[in-house]
Image (tube, grey):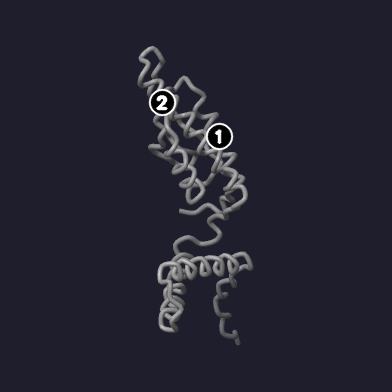
C-alpha cells in the first residue's frame, strides 16, 4: 500500500539577515511613529505598535530583504561625491547654455550595467537622473538608455564609475521584478 504523499514543503524560515532586516525596519517605523506622535500614553504606544507591525509587514512584502542591502558607511561616502559631481556637471551645463561656442551634441547613449533590473538599477537611475547632462529615459535587461547633452563626452564611462561607487554602498541582491 502506498502511504499518503508527503505534504508540500513549507516555505523556508526567514534567514537571520531577513529577521534582522525586519527588526531594523520595525525599529525605524516605531521611531518614526514616536517622532510624529510625541506621546508615551499607553493607547498611543499600542496604536504605534499596531501601525509598526502593519508597516513592517507591508515593507517586507513590497521590498523583500533579498532584493538588496544598503551599506550606510559607503553610502555616506557617496554623498559628498554626488554633491561634488552635481555641482561640476551643473557648471558645465550652465557654461554650455551661456556660451554658444561650446559644443552641444544632444543624443542617446546605451549604458550596459551590472546591476540587475530592480532595486539596485532603479536606485542607480534615480541618482543619475539628478545629475545634470544625462537623463535615463529607458531600460531593458542589459542596461539603461540615456539622453545626453553632449554625446562626444565619455558619458558611458562616467556612468560606469558612478555604478561602481554605488555598488560599494548597495548589494544588488537577487534579480527580481
Q: Is residue 143 above or below residue 133?
A: below
User: Residue at (47%, 42%) from the top-left corner?
Assistant: 127
Q: Quadrant of residue 93?
A: top left
C-alpha span from label 1 to label 2:
20 Å
Tell me the SS state at disc 1.
helix
* Other-residue count near label 2 (Cα within 10 Å), few / some / many at <14 / 14–19 / ≥20: some
**In this view of the protein, which residue sits in the foreground, 11 or 155?**
155
Q: Residue 56, how many percent across, how many down?
A: 47, 69
Q: Residue furthest top?
A: 101
Residue at the bottom extreme of this rendering: 1
Within-10-Å neighbours for mark 1: few <14, some 14–19, many 20+: some
Task: Tell me the residue that label 1 is attached to.
Answer: 160
Q: Which mark is residue 93?
A: 2
**Relative horizontal placement of residue 112, taking residue 44 as reference (left or right):** right
Q: Secondary structure at mark 2?
A: helix
Q: How far across and down, in percent of the image, does residue 154 sit? A: 52, 24
**Residue 102 x %, y %:** 41, 15
Q: Nearer the viewer, mark 1 or mark 2?
A: 2
Give residue 49's mark.
none
Q: Position of residue 107 (x, y in %)?
A: 38, 25
Which residue shows up at 61% across the image and 47% down it? 74
Q: Which quadrant does the N terminus fall into?
A: bottom right
* Quarter-of-image position of residue 138: top left
Horizontal placement of 18 versus 94: left or right?
right
Amino acid at each position: 500500500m502506498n502511504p499518503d504523499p508527503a505534504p508540500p514543503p513549507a516555505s523556508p524560515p526567514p534567514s537571520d539577515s531577513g529577521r534582522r532586516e525586519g527588526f531594523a525596519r520595525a525599529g525605524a517605523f516605531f521611531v518614526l511613529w514616536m517622532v510624529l506622535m510625541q506621546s508615551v500614553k499607553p493607547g498611543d504606544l499600542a496604536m504605534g505598535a499596531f501601525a509598526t507591525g502593519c508597516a513592517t509587514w507591508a515593507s517586507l512584502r513590497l521590498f523583500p530583504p533579498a532584493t538588496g542591502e544598503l551599506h550606510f558607511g559607503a553610502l555616506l561616502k557617496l554623498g559628498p561625491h554626488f554633491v561634488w559631481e552635481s555641482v561640476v556637471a551643473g557648471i558645465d551645463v550652465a557654461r554650455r547654455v551661456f556660451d554658444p561656442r561650446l559644443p552641444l551634441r544632444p543624443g542617446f547613449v546605451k549604458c550596459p550595467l551590472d546591476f540587475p533590473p530592480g532595486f539596485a538599477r532603479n536606485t542607480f537611475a534615480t541618482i543619475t537622473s539628478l545629475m545634470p547632462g544625462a537623463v535615463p529615459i529607458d531600460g531593458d535587461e542589459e542596461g539603461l538608455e540615456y539622453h545626453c547633452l553632449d554625446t562626444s563626452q565619455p558619458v558611458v564611462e562616467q556612468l560606469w564609475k558612478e555604478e561602481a561607487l554605488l555598488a560599494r554602498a548597495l548589494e544588488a541582491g537577487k534579480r527580481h521584478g
